[in-house]
Image (tube, rainbow, N blue to C red):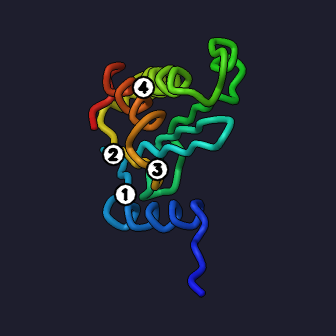
Amino acid sequence: MVSKKSRTEVRRKKHMKLRNRFSGTAQRPRLAVFRSNTHMYVQIVDDTVGNTLVAASTLQKDVKAELEKTNNVEAAAYLGKVIAEKAKEKGITDVVFDRGGFIYQGKVKALAEAAREAGLNF
């Protein structure tokens, strides 16, 4: 009997394949995205030293106050704008986009496009 792997296992495997291809440096850190059923989390990471430089999520009070729901495309787009603004304050303009094994559509795509429009280059 063939057993089917869970979606989270498949996503983790895809993410590890992606992470083997690139990593964030001090000049070009990694923009990592994670989404759950209820929230989205984004952080900019320097993998050479293992530091999170900037982070944002739909759990933060200031972000949550602006949103009607925390798990839709509009929330993802707003979060992309927030992370880009925080990154520009820290002097970060160029990043490597890590979609976290998620398919580049819907919420992940909205977040990426909003971050690009707000000034991040990737």
Question: Which residue type carries mark 4?
Answer: Ala
Secondary structure, mark 3, is loop
Question: Which residue type carries mark 1?
Answer: Ser
Q: Give the mark nearest the N terminus, 2 or 1.
A: 1
Residue 122, given in percent of the width and then of the height, sits at: 28, 38
Secondary structure, mark 2, is strand
The answer to whether marks 2 and 1 mark residues whose Cβ atoms lie closer than 8 Å is yes
Secondary structure, mark 4, is helix
Residue at mark 1 to residue at mark 4: CA–CA distance: 19 Å
Q: Hey, which quadrant is residue 84 in on the image? A: top left
Quadrant occupied by the N terminus: bottom right
Q: Give the mark nearest the N terminus, 4 or 3.
A: 4
Residue at mark 2 to residue at mark 1: CA–CA distance: 8 Å
Q: Which mark is residue 84?
A: 4
Q: Which residue is mark 1?
A: 23
Of the pair 66 and 94, the residue shown nearer to us? 66
Q: Which residue is mark 2?
A: 96
Of the pair 46 and 10, the residue shown nearer to us? 10
Residue at mark 4 to residue at mark 3: CA–CA distance: 20 Å
Secondary structure, mark 1, is loop
Q: Give the mark nearest the N terminus, 3 or 2.
A: 2
Residue at mark 3 to residue at mark 1: CA–CA distance: 17 Å
Can residue 90 be seen here?
no
Q: Which residue is mark 3?
A: 102
